[in-house]
Amino acid sequence: MVHIKRLQEDGADILAIVGEIDASSSIELDLTIAKSVGEGFTRIFVDCSSLEYISSAGLGVFMSYIEEFRDKSIIMILYGMKEKVHNTFQILGLADLLHIRANKQEAKQLLHELSA
Amino acid sequence: MNTKTLARLTFLGAAISWLVLVFSDVTVLFSDLKGLTPDIPIWLPPLMLDLYVVSIYYYYKFKIERDEGLNFTDLLWRVFATGLIATVLSLALRLLDFLLGSTMLSSNIFFIDVQYLANLGLLISFLLAAFSAWKRLILYQKSKWLIRGWTLFEIALMIVLLSDNIKLFQQEWFLTSVSILIGLLALVLSANMKWVAYLNFRQKWTSLLLLLLSFFYLGYFFYTTNRLSDTIALQSSSFLEFRGHIFNIYLFSFIMLYSIFSFLVILFNLPTSSVFEQKLEEVVNFQRISQSVQTEQNEESVYEILLESSVSSVFADAAWLEIKGEHEQNRLQTHHISEVEARKIQEHLNGRNVKGILEQSSDRTRNLSAHLSSLRGTRFRSLMAFPVHVKGEKIGTLALLKELPEGFNKEMAQIVSAFANQAGISIENFRLLKEAIQNERYKEELKIAKTVQKSLLPTHLESANDFDIAAFSESADEVGGDYYDTLRITDSQVGLIIADVSGKGTTAAFHMSQMKGIFHSLAQQALDPKEFMVRANQALRYCLERGSFISATYFVVDAEARRIYYSRAGHCPVLYYRAQENGLEYITDKGAALGMVKGKDFCNYVETNSIPYHPGDIMVLYTDGITEAKNQKGEEFGSKRLKQTIQEVLEQSPREMQNHLIRNLYAYTGTEEIDDDYTTMIVKFKHARTIENQTR
């Protein structure tokens, strides 16, 4: 089960994922990201501090946006991952493809750098 | 002995007793007239009569009582036919008498006696035929007490029959009490008229006619035998006077009593018989609807039966059944009304904004007659509509029409409602059955898919003389997405692969089969592992749907260089045991899964690595199904526990290590049900025996 909260800060959309993302709940994640993009956000933060587990289907959702975001110059930064979750991203090689930071501070820092 | 033989025997017995009766009676009469003592005992004629009665009784018992094929009118017909034959025979005798004219013979008392006895025999035969038939009618709906009553009645009649011959039974008080008993029983038994209710209108008329004719026969015989016995009695009293034989009187009275009762009951039941018939028909229609599933009919036939049954149950002049079509158009089945007219009435009601049943949204039975009166040019004056529901969803409307105003009543609405409900249930059953069959088929298909997929995994693993290998795979669903395989590339090189398709089930299985194709075509080209991954990614980029990827690790074990070259594309890190250092570690390096990056720059995300191997080294490959397997508390098996498990059995063969791992895994999860596919491949290196020969 997953719950995704959205809040906006400085023109960026923050998606806070609470719970586990498996095959069924990955749809919700996909919908939320699509919605954020649909609303015109080009700066998206994903707060993973309460993300307990992510399955390959959930990773697939993040993966599927990589090329689209690159083409549309949308910046998505994930932060606050637990070690175990980060490990999953790492193994799959997604850590190199996505922007992942330890905390919100660093994420904002990165955004600043990328936007510059 | 079968019934037929028994019937014949009893008939023969009756015929013999009758003949003996005639001779003995004539002899007795003759002796009396001549003033002689008869040569034969005078008790013989009554005894013969009794014998005759008993024989005929059993004859009909076998002919009528035991014949299961007879219905009520058939029974009455049997009685009537027996009466007819008896009357015809009797009339033939009279004709003979008439033809002889006033000759000596016709006025001869012995000839009259024979005639009299013939008529008596025929009368008794007719009475007993009726008796057997009445018995079946009375006992149609048996109860314990009814059967006891009837048995008692028969015993009492038997006593009366024998009273002529047995002195004991001839005492006044005894006979009187038996007679009273018979009278009471006859009255009580005659009240059992339940069979009448099961006759339909036509059968009732037939029964009345048959009964009426039977009355006629009874009257005729009574008159004839009376007249003949009177004639004889004028000359002598020493003959078998049937009127002195109370049994005959009682039997006659009982037959008469029940016939009169039946006649009256049928007569008074005539006006209500249509109601009973109607009810019976409703039950039959109900059965037809509910049994249509078993008789392998289809939904169409249920609709037809519903329409037919409803029309006939409420005497509707016309009806239509509108079934919600799969597309926009609704289907209309009509009965005695054209589709155009039905649509016109619907339009009219819709036009008047009648929030009634005719629009598909409403779900209540409604009498819409009032709205019909405002429609011109229609012959109908009453209209009632019913919904047909399947699983709580309305699938159609049944509309019944009558030319009479106020043509429907509450009872009619109830019965049609019941029909509509039953039809809904039948249709639901049809659909469930269809679904069940469909599901069964899918299951079969999945079974086939499972077999096919199993065959995609190698049954035999490529071995070399410097390593042993074992592999295991178990899917969570019918079909899984894990893949492992081996292929000999050159004499010194063996390619190994382990892969895990994201997601589970059928789609994963399809991608897995693609992966197998890719492995077999690319591996034999002796590619560098990184090149292998880049090309595999190239091949898969258009096959994988959005969000899908395949994690894989490809190894080339080179016996000549004694090195393992490998490229990891997002797959779980290899657990490697270095025997020389006695160290068991995960090998970490970079590598993105296949399908993650669709473009050419995928080559930036994968790399070829190599490690040397030595005898005793162990390489444990696995999929994330193993590390992510959860126990009852939801904790994962994890890479630490995996490492620890392997650590325990480093000295064992790959097969034993694998079994140990699987045992531990199942023990940890505590269930046979697995969430994700488990796959493991374990390679253990050893001293090559003939390495020179191998490398040539």
Image (spheres, coloured by chain):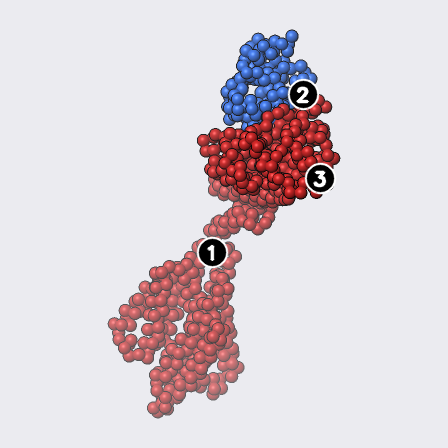
Chain colours: A blue, B red
Residue B386 is at least partly visible in this image? no
Residue B459 position (above or below residue B20): above
Mark 3: amino acid: Thr
Q: For the residues carrying marks 2 and 1, which lies nearer the camera in this image? A: 2
Q: Quadrant of the C terminus of chain B?
A: top right
Q: Which mark identifies residue A67? A: 2
For label 3, the SS is helix
Position in image of residue B427 (x %, y %): 56, 42
Viewer-side label of 3, 1: 3
Pair 2/3: label in front: 3
Task: Respond whether the residues carrying marks 3 and 1 are from the same subunit.
Answer: yes
Whether B326 is drawn above or below B38: the answer is above
* Mark 1 secondary-structure assignment: helix
Q: Amino acid at mark 1?
A: Tyr
Counting labels gives: 3
Q: Which residue is mark 3?
A: B695
Along the viewing direction, whichever of B444 and B210 lies nearer the viewer? B444
Amino acid on which disc 2 is placed: Glu
Cα distance in 3D space between marks 2 and 3:
46 Å
The residue under label 1 is B198
- Residue B642: x and y in percent read 52, 33
Residue visible at 50% across and 64% down in the picture: B69
Q: Position of B254 compared to B476: left or right?
A: left
Relative height, residue B195 to residue B354 (above, below) = below
